[in-house]
Every structure is written in C-alpha cells, then in structure tokens.
Image (cartoon, rainbow, N blue to C red):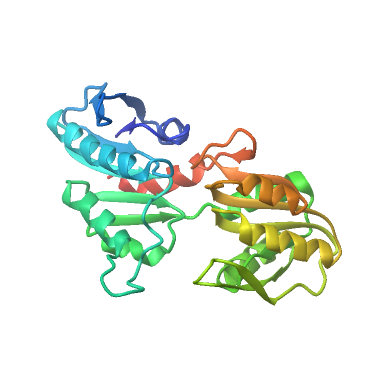
C-alpha cells in the first residue's frame, strides 16, 4: 500500500506510512486564478493500493472536492484500489433532517466518496459512528479520544474528567474508569433562537486538577461554561482536551478567559498555540485492516 497525502494531513499520513511499513507520497497543489484547485499525483502507483489522506476542517468544500479529484487521479495513474483516511470529516453534524427541505449532508458526502471509486474509508472521531453506515464500502471509525485523554492526564496530573454534556458522559465516564480517575458532567441547554447556553446540571464537587474532555471544540462556549462550573465547584486548575480543535472565531480567548490553563488536541487539526498529540498510531491500527 502507498500512503498519499492530498493537501491537509498534518503529519498523520507520514505517521501511518511509517507504522504500516508503507511508502509515503503526496500531491502537488496549486490554485488557479479563479479559485479552482489543481492537484497532481507525484508518485508511480500503477497496480498499487493507494490510501489517500485528507482532512476537511478548513475550507471544507475545497478539501472535499480535492479528495474526489485525488481518487480520480489515483485511478487514472493505474491504482488497483483507492482507500481513504479522513482525519476530520466535514458535513458530519447534519446526520438527520431537523427541518423540512434539509439534506442529510453526512450521507451526501460519504455516498459521493464511495461513488467516486473509494472502496474503504477510515474516519477519525466522526460526529457519530453510526453515520459511517452511509458509506457503502468498508468503513472504520478511528477512536482517538482515550489516547488524547491519557496523554493530557499524564502531562497535567489531572485526577478528574469532566464531560461538557450528558451526551458525552457515558464515554467520558468509561475512559475515566479505565484511567483510574473520578468523573462528572454538566448539562446545558442551548437556545435554538440565539444559541445562548443555560445550565441544567452543574458540578457538586471538582476538587484538585480537572480535565474537561470532548471529541470536538468548535466555538468554545460549552467548554468555557464547563470550566467556570469546575472552578466554582473547587477545582484548583482546569485543562481541556479534545480530538478536533476547530476553535472557530474567538474560541481561544473565550476558553482562556474562563480560566483554562492548557488546551490539548490531536494532529487531525494543527494549531501551534495548543498542545498537539499525535494520533497516527490509532489511525495506523485502523487502516492496517485494509491491507489484505
């Protein structure tokens, strides 16, 4: 198998290639004056299985189209099979219809990738694992949250994990038990009118160092609220860890102002101002199942 970085893989492609004993290559990229992407495969892949690596966190429309073109380029160059590793899958939030006339965007994206000729896909921490069923070929969910949590706990000395909502509580609680830590969660209500948050369940006790754990941080509002709750409940320090650090707009400032000491994330999205944890190992284990 040959691992090929498309345009946005932040070292995960190279890491996976090294761990699976595969060659690593990449695409040449440029942008035409009208904004269209140009890519060219810089490798001989004739008769080979090709694993394309492409994240979609920034400029998701562009990254998605580049991935479709990369599949076409690989087959045009004679690849036997084309697989995909997606560090961050865009359009995964809309996994069902909330209002009449809406698409299921997760379904549209995953079906398009399959229809392009990609037969196997691995996605690191998708919005929901169930949505990978929209991909008609072999799909693998790469679970990286526990690895990120363990490394963040080791560095911070945290004794408690906090889930920022009830939906993530079960998973965070399980991870806490395996790491020998306490755990708790907050529950908030988000207004569908203006997006404001109101607290439904706070924390009773958060003594010592705590780590707020979530799969993704977008605007930072939920994490900031959880941090304030933890400090009010007695935490001596608060750190945050997530797999995907989108950190949209003023999210960093919002989180810092809420009293957070450090923010940990994975290299599915690269942010030099945060503590980055390499999850190539988890990705390599997943894609090794692609190799016959």
Location of residue 203 by image quarter: bottom right
Residue 145 in picture, x, y percent from top left: 56, 54
Quadrant where the image shows the N terminus: top left
Q: Is residue 291 visible?
A: no
Is 195 in front, or is 167? Answer: 195
Q: Nearer the viewer, residue 140 or 276?
A: 276
Q: Quadrant of the C terminus?
A: top left
Residue that extends furthest to the front in the rendered view of this protein: 194
Residue at 56%, 47% in the rendered image: 247
Can residue 166 be seen here? The reply is yes
Q: Is residue 100 left or right of residue 237?
A: left
Q: Position of residue 86 (x, y in %)?
A: 38, 45
Residue 283, compared with residue 232, is above or below; it is above
- In the image, residue 266 lies at what x, y percent? 56, 43
Total residue callouts:
0
User: In percent of the image, x 69 and y 64: which residue is there?
Assistant: 162
């Amino acid at each position: 198998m040959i691992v090929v970085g498309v345009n946005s893989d932040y070292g995960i492609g190279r890491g996976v290639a090294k761990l699976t004993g595969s060659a690593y290559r990449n695409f040449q990229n440029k942008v035409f004056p009208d904004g269209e992407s140009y890519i060219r495969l810089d490798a001989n892949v004739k008769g080979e299985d090709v694993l394309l690596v492409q994240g979609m966190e920034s400029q998701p429309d562009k990254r998605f189209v580049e991935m479709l073109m990369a599949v076409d380029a690989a087959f045009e160059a004679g690849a036997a099979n084309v697989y995909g590793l997606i560090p961050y899958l865009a359009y995964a939030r809309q996994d069902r219809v909330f209002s009449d006339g809406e698409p299921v965007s997760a379904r549209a994206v995953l079906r398009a990738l399959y229809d392009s000729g990609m037969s196997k896909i691995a996605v690191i921490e998708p919005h929901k694992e169930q949505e990978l069923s929209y991909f008609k070929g072999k799909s693998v969910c790469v679970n990286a949250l526990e690895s990120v949590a363990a490394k963040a706990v080791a560095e911070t000395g945290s004794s408690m994990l906090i889930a920022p909502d009830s939906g993530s509580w079960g998973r965070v609680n399980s991870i806490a038990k395996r790491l020998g830590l306490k755990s708790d969660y907050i529950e908030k209500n988000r207004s569908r009118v203006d997006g404001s948050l109101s607290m439904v369940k706070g924390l009773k006790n958060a003594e010592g160092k705590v780590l707020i754990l979530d799969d993704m941080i977008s605007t930072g509002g939920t994490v900031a609220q959880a941090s304030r709750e933890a400090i009010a409940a007695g935490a001596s320090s608060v750190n945050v860890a997530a797999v995907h650090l989108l950190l949209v707009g003023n999210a960093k400032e919002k989180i810092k102002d809420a009293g957070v000491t450090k923010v940990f994330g994975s290299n599915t999205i690269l942010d030099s101002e945060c503590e980055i944890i390499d999850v190539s190992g988890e990705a390599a284990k997943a894609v090794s199942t692609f190799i016959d």
